Image: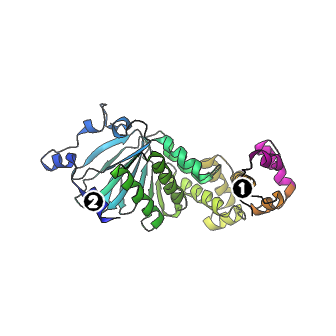
Amino acid sequence: MQRELLEQLREITEEERRILNGDAEVDRDLYTSGSDFTIDSNKMLEEGKLIAIRTHTRFVHFPLHRHNYVEVLYVCEGTLTNIIDGKQVIVRKGELLFLNQFTHHEILAAGRSDIAINFMVLPEFFDVAYSMAGNNNVLADFLVNVLRRDNQQGEYLHFKVSEVLQIQNLLENIIYSLVTGRGNQNKINQTTMGLIFLYLMDSVQYVEMRLPNQYENMISMTTLDYIEQKYRTATLTELCDMLHLPMHVLSKMIKKTTCFNFKELLQRKRLSKAVELMCDTDLPISDIIAAVGYENNSYFHRVFKERYGVTPRAFRVANQKNDKVRL
């Protein structure tokens, strides 16, 4: 991170100055108007904004609380220790912690050199990231639904992505924009966070999760990522071999956590990719069918019409862009 920006983030805030002068607790009135300690988005975000940031308050134990928004914690320097559902979750430099709405957690006192950013994000923000991920992106479906849930079961996603330079650069850009407040960049910031989200979807191998039925959810996330990456040739047999699970066990897990079986997930991905190629290229439909992994043209036409209500050719005529790419 740029030295000038980091020095600005290190500056002692007014709240921290009061704590250093003898206040033993955080001032709850800064965060909530209610009797319970639910940090209120109306206090933390300006009207009309879907995302804002603040530096995490140091020098004091931040007591058990929750938020009525999604919190994303990013550590710029040092570490920050969260207690979530009784478990210590240590977030280190360059790592991200996504906390679901209303997840209860507390944070141990941070020192002067522990610099962390709290991104405060309204759930509808993820509509932008979701649209950027493309229609029927099954991994995006899974992650966005996790973040949108309204419960108190200590759900989080901990991305250990300090070595992923694209994510670090994008985070620095959005932090700089929000800290300096230069211009009305709400749309730019939403798009930048959307790009970060896309890179995170490509980095699920670095994620630690705390969800109900954690093992099943992790297996399902691995399945969704496998389909995203290898939809042309993906098979349930290959996936079972990769995960060292019997087919009936894996099939049951996938159905339970995604509400679709493996074949349905794979078909959704292949059809959505076919739609993308139909709308954005001049490739013959027969070539598109082969490109997305189907060997039987008649079968493709049948499942496509079942899904979209029209033939592939009719769909292309109705939806193809004028500035399509010619391949």
Please name the residue that numbered disc 1 is placed on. Answer: 324
Residue drawn 51% across the image and 56% down it:
195
- Relative to residue 317, is residue 102 drawn left or right? left
How many neighbours does mark 1 have within 10 angstroms: few (below 14), some (14-19), or many (20 or more)?
few
Say if the magenta span includes residue 25.
Answer: no
As drawn, 51 above or below 266: above
State whether the magenta stretch is mostly helix, strand or loop: helix
Residue in view at x 51 percent, y 52 percent = 194
Quadrant of residue 111 within the rendered picture: bottom left
Name the amino acid type tagged 2: Asp
Looking at the rendered structure, the secondary structure element under dot 2 is: loop
Q: Position of residue 273 (x, y in %)?
A: 70, 55
- Residue annotated with mark 2: 114
Looking at marks 1 and 2 on the same chain, the residue that comes earlier in the sequence is marked by 2
Give the distance between the C-alpha atoms of the residues marked 1 and 2, in whole angstroms: 49 Å
Within 10 Å of disc 2 (Cα), the crowding (few <14, some 14-19, many 20+) is: many
In-front residue for pair 101/126: 126
Identified at 20% across, 46% down, the residue is: 14
Q: Amino acid at mark 1?
A: Lys
* Residue 86 placement, left or right of 207: left
Image mark for residue 286: none
